[in-house]
Structure formats: C-alpha cells, structure tokens
Amino acid sequence: MPSSHGFRRTLRRAATPLTAVALALGISATMATPASASNSYNGNQFMNGSGTAFKDDWNDEGIVAEFGGYNRNSNVTCLWQKIVFWADSSTGHRDQIDGYFGHNTTLATYAWQSTYMGPAAADGVVGKATWAAAGTRLRDTDGDGTVDKYDGRYRDIAISRVNGVYHFADADGNDRMANYDARTCTII
C-alpha cells in the first residue's frame, strides 16, 4: 500500500499540468465568445445590409447591452436608444439618448421587448431576436427600393443605408454611421 506522502506528491505533480491545461482552455473559451473579436455576429464594424429586401437586414446584428461589455458605448447603442426612448416611447425621452447603454436603457429595452416580442422574450439585452423584431419596422416610404425610416409607434426615425452601412441623424442632425466600435453621436 503506498504511503500518503507519496500519494500527495503524485497529486501535486499532476496538479500543475492539469491547472495549466484548464487555464488554457478557459482562456480559449473566453476568446471564442460570439461578440468578442468583432463586436458583431456577422463580423462587421457597422450595422449593415444589402439588396432590396431590407426588412431582414437587422437579423444578424451584434449585441448591445449594459453588462458583458457588449458595445455599451457606441453609435449602435445611440440608434437603439432612438428607437426605445423616442420612436416607440409615448413620452419621448430624448434626454436619454446618449450612446451609453446604462440601467435606464436596460429598463426601456425590457419594456420594448415585452411590448413588441412578448413578455417571455424580455431580457434587457439587444441581440439577434430584438434586432430582427425592430428590423421588421424598417420602411421605404418614397418607393425607390431603399430603406429611409424606422416606422415608430409614436415617431419615425430617418434612417438610410449607404453602401450597405446604416446611417441615422444624431441630436444635432449630423449623419452618423451605426458603428459598434465608436460613439460619436451628439447627446441632448
């Protein structure tokens, strides 16, 4: 029967390589999360689309959320805030549109998801399903085959798609690209 001292020594020798392997696997798994490298499901820096059937353009967009480091400070967040605080809000809280996904944006997202996707879908995170639901409200109002607005419940948002990239006007009327990696939208 082996001594307990020898058994502990064997465990210590095995523990070091096993710990290194576990650490390596943990780092590898962390680096492989869907939005970690490109900040988007589709690998693009911007919200984009192509073709004349623009209602499915937002079906593969990236995550914006308060927690998890998902594009919390971005022009894409600013565009989402224009939807939840302006277009689909009866009170029109323009003062909440700042491109920073904080607690108020999370609460407004829960409310939007409950209204437009059903209470069971509400999680406060803007991911694929939420973008897809919002994308069904993109419209071509002048009949030229290109998107020109988000058809809000209370107010519309002027939106355009230039060379595949979505654009919107910020608080000062400046044209902004819906960028996951930059926040240049003017706040109110």
Image: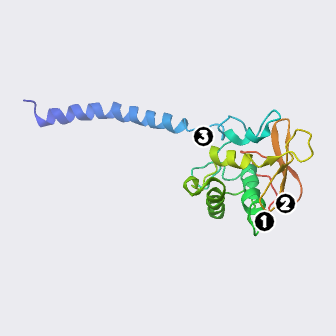
Q: Give me the disc on residue 14.
A: none
Residue 133 shown left or right of residue 31 in the figure: right
Which residue does the image show at 77% across and 39% down from the upper left? 48
According to the image, what is the colour scheme of the structure?
rainbow
In this figure, which residue is indicated by the disc labeled 3?
A: 36
**Toward the viewer: 54 or 41?**
54
Earlier residue among tags 2 and 3: 3
Query: For the residue carrying disc 3, how many other residues have a C-alpha within 10 Å: few (<14), some (14-19), or many (20+)?
Result: some
| Horizontal side of residue 173 vs 92, given as left or right | right
Q: Amino acid at mark 1?
A: Arg
The count of marks equals 3
Residue depicted at 75% across the width and 70% down the height: 91
Q: Quadrant of the N terminus?
A: top left
Q: Nearer the viewer, residue 93 or 21?
A: 93
- Amino acid under disc 2: Ala
Q: Nearer the viewer, residue 143 or 11?
A: 143
Which label sits in the foreground, 2 or 3?
2
Determine which of the numbered discs, if any, sits on residue 171 in the image.
Answer: 2
Disc 1: which residue: 94
Q: Is residue 66 left or right of residue 182?
A: left
Label 2: which secondary element: loop
Query: Residue 43: horizontal and vertical position, in percent?
Result: 68, 34
Q: Where residue 128 sits in the image (x, y, percent)?
A: 64, 43
Residue 30 visible, this angle: yes
Distance of label 3 from label 1 (alpha carbons): 30 Å
The numbered mark, 2 or 1, whose residue comes first in the sequence reads 1
Q: CA distance from mark 2 to mark 1?
A: 9 Å
Q: What crowding class fits label 1: few (fewer than 14 Cα within 10 Å), some (14-19), or many (20 or more)?
A: some
Looking at the picture, which amino acid does disc 3 mark?
Answer: Ser
The tag earlier along the polypeptide, 3 or 1, is 3
| Viewer-closest of 57 and 70 | 57
